[in-house]
């Protein structure tokens, strides 16, 4: 039996949902369908066997027009209940959801890794068409920093350790007036012609204040780096902007300081997701992590 998982049933399904996905499901930002399997013995008790989590997202339909699509975030069936058709039942229910709402189709992203080939084959059997795309994201771990440090010579290592001292003019976003912060974000948005920053909040309370910094020059924000805290304790770089052209080194100093803070103060398993939304951020990422490529994924479409 497939049900729409509400707050009442959610507790039983939590073991099937990754920790970093549980909060948006609780808050009903994402929706969850669950499979209940009747226990052997016929005592009427059912146990959670599988879930599919999805959310409505703005996207591009097959005709190139903007539309609303249902994006699959997670599909999982507990190991002991596989090969019983549960994944198909969940997909059928999601297909019925699609037919009952104005969304144009369903999309899903699968890592570009051979371990996910069977999952791709499953979606293909449902009529999904796949293409390989550049997700324009880079995931940085503490291991990446360690490898970078290990590759330096002695002189570079000494320089890197000294670079963590706070550069002149650097402040936490929480230490400057909200009005000054909002003005800086507005200016950064105006300088980004592709609209990549349009939806970024101008309220500093929406960011991870301990690791988000600005550089102040002449009582104005000259550069800034903004992180949001993701579920599970990871960080996401949502804005990396240099507003002043008089000192190109400034944004590098700011980024190095933020990176050093993350490295020293965050748990070993905490990751940083960098969205490479424009050419400047791509070049910056390539300069800092030359041996790390942006994430490639397989994106599937179903209409």
Image: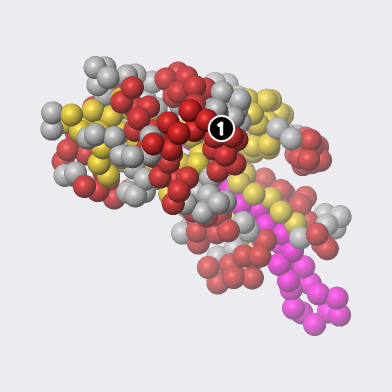
Q: Quadrant of residue 17?
A: bottom right
Query: Does dot 1 land on a helix, a strand or a loop?
Result: helix
Which SS does the magenta portion mostly show? strand
Quadrant (top left/top right/bottom left/bottom right) for the C terminus: top right
- Seen in the picture, residue 141 relative to 41 is either above or below; the reply is above
Residue 253, given in percent of the width and then of the height, sits at 35, 30
Residue 241, given in percent of the width and then of the height, sits at 33, 27
Residue lying farthest to the bottom in this orientation:
43
Q: Residue at x 74, y 63 (%)?
A: 49
Query: How many numbered badges does the structure rendering display?
Result: 1
Give, as a single range, the part of the protein colored magenta: 33-61
Which of 248 and 233 lies nearest the eye of the viewer? 248
Which of 252 and 72 lies nearest the eye of the viewer? 252
Indicate left or right for 73 with 218 as reference: right
- Seen in the picture, residue 223 relative to 10 is either above or below; the reply is above
Residue 47, given in percent of the width and then of the height, sits at 73, 71
Q: Residues within 10 Å of mark 1 (few under 14, many from 20)?
A: some
Q: Residue at x 57, y 51 (%)?
A: 269
Q: Report which residue position mark 1 lands on.
A: 148
Which of 74 and 187 lies nearest the eye of the viewer? 187
Residue lying farthest to the front in this orientation:
154
């Amino acid at each position: 039996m497939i049900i729409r998982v509400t707050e009442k049933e959610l507790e039983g399904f939590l073991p099937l949902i990754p920790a970093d996905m549980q909060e948006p499901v609780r808050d009903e930002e994402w929706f969850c369908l669950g499979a209940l399997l009747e226990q052997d013995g016929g005592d009427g008790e059912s146990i959670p066997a599988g879930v599919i989590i999805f959310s409505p997202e703005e996207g591009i339909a097959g005709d190139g027009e903007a539309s609303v699509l249902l994006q699959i975030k997670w599909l999982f069936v507990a190991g002991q209940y596989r090969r019983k058709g549960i994944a198909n039942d969940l997909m059928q229910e999601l297909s019925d959801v699609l037919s009952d709402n104005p969304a144009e189709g369903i999309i899903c992203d699968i890592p570009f890794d051979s371990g996910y080939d069977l999952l791709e084959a499953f979606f293909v059997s449902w009529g999904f068409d796949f293409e390989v795309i550049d997700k324009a994201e880079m995931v940085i771990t503490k291991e990446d920093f360690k490898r970078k440090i290990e590759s330096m010579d002695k002189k570079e290592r000494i320089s890197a350790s000294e670079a963590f001292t706070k550069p002149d003019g650097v402040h936490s976003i929480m230490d400057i007036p909200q009005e000054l912060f909002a003005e800086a974000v507005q200016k950064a948005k105006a300088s980004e012609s592709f609209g990549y920053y349009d939806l970024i909040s101008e309220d500093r309370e929406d960011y991870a204040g301990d690791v988000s910094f600005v550089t102040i020059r002449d009582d104005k924000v000259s550069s800034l780096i903004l992180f949001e805290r993701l579920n599970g304790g990871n960080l996401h770089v949502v804005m990396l902007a240099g507003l002043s052209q008089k000192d190109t080194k400034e944004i590098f100093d700011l980024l190095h300081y933020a990176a050093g803070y993350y490295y020293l103060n965050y748990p070993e398993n905490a990751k940083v997701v960098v969205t490479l939304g424009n050419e400047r951020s791509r070049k910056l990422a390539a300069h800092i992590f030359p041996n790390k490529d942006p994430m490639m994924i397989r994106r599937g479409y179903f209409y």
